[in-house]
Amino acid sequence: MQPNHFEALLEVADDSLILGQRLCEWCGHAPTIEVDLSLSNLALDLIGQATLLLDYAGELEGKGRTADRLAFHRDAEAFRNSMLLEQPNSDFARTVMRHFLFAAYANPLFEALARSPDARLAEIAAKSIKELRYHLEYATDWLERLGQGTDESHRRIANAFDWNWRFVDDLFFDSISWKSGAEIGLWPLRADLRPAFDDTLSAGLALAGLAEPKPAWPIVGGRMGKHSEHLSSMLTVMQVLPRAHPEATW
């Protein structure tokens, strides 16, 4: 991998970091203790993946920035995560649907990255895919349980799908940096992952008794540093301690 693919690597790392942070917000607030622990474990998986990817990105950048420096000392416009992942948790159904959509996208992505000629990236992806397969199983199970549960749970998961669906195209946006890596065979274009995602989506919706999505005006921009107001608010909380003590070691 070449240094000019630093931002492309951030796109993958920031997805995991931001979603991991969002899931951390459920700690102490989830519907049950079991779910509280489950979501915390999913968050730890994602933050672990982000740490490995951000450390590698920092090495590629060559400016001495570590994973912690990249996570805690960038402003919102420097993040390259999909806008889907920065959206507020809201109710549990919206969190489940967001995670299902992300996992349906991340599984074929990381399977492809595990075959990358970049050995370091392939190693990180191979470790991560084992975790992400479980994430998809977990989210699919809850998708089915909510969709086939009560009238209220079905209504909530259907509303959650409508809310999250408009951000899905942002997951698959191919930035200039990403296209550059795809041209030399480091990874596929994200557009090429869409059929696998669509198959997983259709299967999940069928289990939940939900209708296929209607066309929606897509909201994109996260890969280019254009975010909703929710990311800045989240980063204020996430970064307050490292920014207050920038030279501290932990």
Image (cartoon, helix red, strand yellow):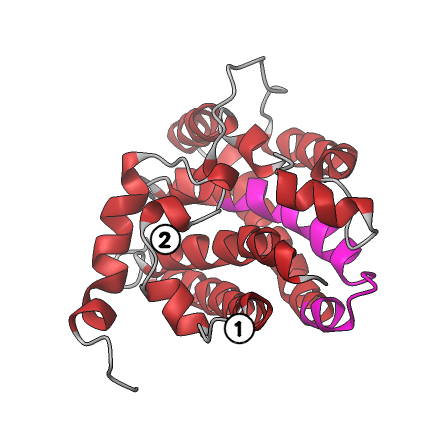
Nearer the observer, disc 2 or disc 1? Answer: 1
183 lies above or below 60:
above
- The answer, for residue 97, to whether it is visible in the render is no
Left or right of residue 112: residue 96: left
The amino acid sitting under disc 2 is Arg
On the image, the x and y values in percent for residue 213 come to 59, 19
Residue topped by disc 1: 55
For marks 2 and 1, the one nearer the N-term is 2
Under tag 2, what secondary structure? helix
Q: Which of 30 and 245 is in front in this view?
A: 245
CA–CA distance between discs 2 and 1?
A: 21 Å
Which mark is drawn over residue 204?
A: none
Q: Residue placed at 36% from the left, 53% from the top?
A: 22
Q: Nearer the viewer, residue 229 or 21?
A: 229
Residue topped by disc 2: 22
Left or right of residue 23: residue 218: right
231 lies above or below 215:
below
- Identify the magenta region: 99-124
Under tag 1, what secondary structure? helix
| Quarter placement of the C terminus | bottom left
Q: Residue furthest bottom?
A: 249
On the image, the x and y values in percent for residue 125 come to 70, 65
247 lies above or below 157:
below
Left or right of residue 137: residue 14: left
- The answer, for residue 204, to whether it is visible in the render is yes
- Which quarter of the picture shows residue 174? top right
Residue 4 within the segment the image draws in magenta:
no
| Quarter placement of the N terminus | bottom right
